[in-house]
Image (cartoon, rainbow, N blue to C red):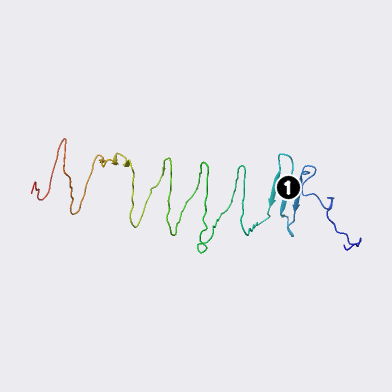
Amino acid sequence: LNGDPDQPIIMGRTYHQDNRSPGSLPGTKTQMTIRSKTYKGDGFNELRFEDATGKEELYMHAQKDMTTEVLHDRTTTVNNNHTETVVVGQTVNVGTKKEGGHDQKITVANDQKTTVVNNQITEITEGNKKTDIDKGDQEITLHEGKQTIKVKKTISVSSEEKIEFICGESSITLLENGEITISGKIIKNDAKDEYHVNTKKLSADGSEEQVLTGGILKLNP
């Protein structure tokens, strides 16, 4: 230091009995390792470079927590597969409402599969939700349980060809030409006060029996 030979600056040192290599030699001869040691403990933090041909690897080990801070953009490119495992929980926050314009976009070139073992909740505090399928079908299957839809205003179901409701041997079919077919073993219409049918032509056909009952029956009043 300052030209004083009695104050040397050590730029590096070789491993020996008291200062051993982080890995066993010669098995780890292609590795360069930077490893610290937990104060009064057996843990360590490590940054390791593997330079064996065909096995090149960059390895990082955090004994406890790991924090990464990026002040601007971050880009990660994986040219093959990517596997991420979280043993406990995961939280992803994208911007804040007061900042505005902080959206999340996920693009999948082929298929996407999401598996949830327990419950799944999607909560939209304000705004809309839209599912847009350019080509193909949509199918919802509940192997057990029931499905409930609740709205405060209007439910609208629209189809350019056919709408069909099926429950066992009962069905309601609506066709694009205006034809509606209600099919079932027993069909009941129950109007508490009034029941109106308005049409140009009305036919009633009972192959075995036809019964009309009422306090007063009027025909062409």
Left/right of residue 145 with respect to residue 187 in the rendered view: right
Residue wearing tag 1:
49
Task: Say which residue appears at 72% left-offset and 52% top-offset.
Answer: 46
Task: Say which residue appears at 71% left-offset and 43% top-offset.
Answer: 56
Left/right of residue 1 with respect to residue 177 in the rendered view: right
On screen, 85 above or below 124? above
Please rate how many residues cluster around mark 1, counting C-alpha atoms within 10 Å: few if below 14, some from 14 to 19, many from 20: some
Coordinates of residue 205 in the picture (x, y in percent): 16, 38
Coordinates of residue 114 in the picture (x, y in percent): 50, 46
Res. 74 image quadrant: bottom right
Coordinates of residue 18 in the picture (x, y in percent): 83, 53
Helix, strand or loop at mark 1: strand
Name the residue furthest right: 5
> Closer to the camera, 186 or 90?
90
Coordinates of residue 6 in the picture (x, y in percent): 91, 61
Task: Say which residue appears at 73% left-offset and 47% top-offset.
Answer: 49
Q: Amino acid at mark 1?
A: Phe
